[in-house]
Image (spheres, rainbow, N blue to C red):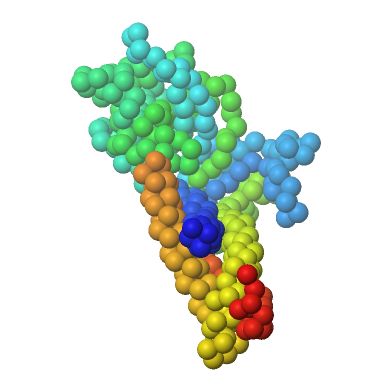
Amino acid sequence: MGFRTRTLLMVVAMAIGVGAVIVLTALGEGARRYVVAEFSSLGTHLIIVFPGRTETGGNLPGMLVGRTPRDLTIADAMALLRSRYVLRVAPLNIGSAQLSRGQRSREVPVLGTTDEFAAIRNMSLSQGRFLPAGDPAAPQSVCVIGDKLRAELFGPEPALGQWVRVGDRRFRVVGVFAQQGQALGFNTDELVVLPIGSVQQLFNQQSLLRILIEARNRDALEPARDDVRRILIARHEGEEDVTVVTQDAVLATFDRILRTLTVAVGGIAAISLAVAGILIMNVMLISVSQRTREIGLLKAIGASGAQIRGLFFAEAIMLSVIGALIGYVLGELGVAAIGRIYPAFPAAAPVWAITAGIGTAVATGIVFSLMPARRASRLDPVMALARR
């Protein structure tokens, strides 16, 4: 009974360690993949302009350190089209307001932009069309709504051409987004998009939250960024008071941070393997004391010290491998459970983590079996046989 309990403890310790490594690195890798996918869904060859300058020392834009940055305006956004490297520009403003039709109403996120936004973001519509072209500063009484809002407000009735109220103003529905779900914190199925001029009038706010820019191609990304910076500095009286970042730069930063995080959580989980190794050493030391007569008999019939050490090594390796494989199965089951509970989260343990987890488990079993194996190989056969 004692041998079974001892063996079970060693296997369970290894299984928990390997399973923890797999699950935690899967969460880290899933977070990395999720962020990369979300930013990739924004579109391609993107440049984003924020008001306020982010200093190289890591400070946030000026308003957070006591300085108010100059506002970005619709005129700033339209001026960027002067660059031959820029294909499209979409100024953005975001707020929230009450959306209502008849007796039905709810609070919704409201996005203000221009007709170029759908092409930049690769957004598709199931009905109608996107915002019409025209002077972006001029208010227009049209809107595009998400599919869930269409179902809630109109049910089986057609939505196109109908009027809804956003805040204290009326807008005619000209388009309905296809079902797309979450994207960077926004559920597009519950989004209302208005012309940027209408949003500025609705919220009485003339500044822009940011400007989205699409370069003509990947090769034009860096020249376009330089042109954007140059144009805005010229418009802002020679002051560089905006932050201009490329989509690739944002992705690279997040990718680097989340890869480091994955390695870190994997390392934290690997500590449990060291704990498992200490358990193996303690259990095997107890095993040596319990099996002294068995060891003495083996040595009495001619087993060498190296063979005794090999026996203990073989036991430690076998139990470590069995524990590691059970941990691998448990870890994969845990990852599968996460995927079932959160289908949008692409949790998957990287191959290096699986290999490292199993390899570390086996190596830990070997290393921590050295002392017990050495002690067993040095036992005197006569004394061992005489011991009760």
Rendered location of residue 177, percent (x, y)? 32, 34
State the residue at coordinates (64%, 77%): 386
Q: How many marks?
A: 0
Rendered location of residue 151, percent (x, y)? 28, 23
State the residue at coordinates (48%, 20%): 97
Relative side of 349 to 153, left or right: right
On-image quarter of the C terminus: bottom right
Q: Is residue 264 visible?
A: no
State the residue at coordinates (59%, 28%): 206
Relative side of 20 to 173, left or right: right
Nearer to us in this view, 344 or 357: 357
Nearer to us in this view, 318 or 112: 318
State the residue at coordinates (33%, 27%): 148
**Image-quadrant location for residue 285:** bottom right
Nearer to us in this view, 113 or 12: 12
Q: Is residue 254 visible?
A: yes
**Image-quadrant location for residue 182:** top left
Relative side of 231 to 188, left or right: right
Q: Eyeballing the image, is 235 above or below 14?
A: above
Relative side of 33 to 382, left or right: left
Q: Eyeballing the image, is 384 above or below 305?
A: above
Q: Residue furthest right?
A: 66
Q: Residue furthest top?
A: 103
Rendered location of residue 154, percent (x, y)? 27, 19
Rendered location of residue 328, percent (x, y)? 44, 61
Q: Eyeballing the image, is 234 above or below 327?
A: above
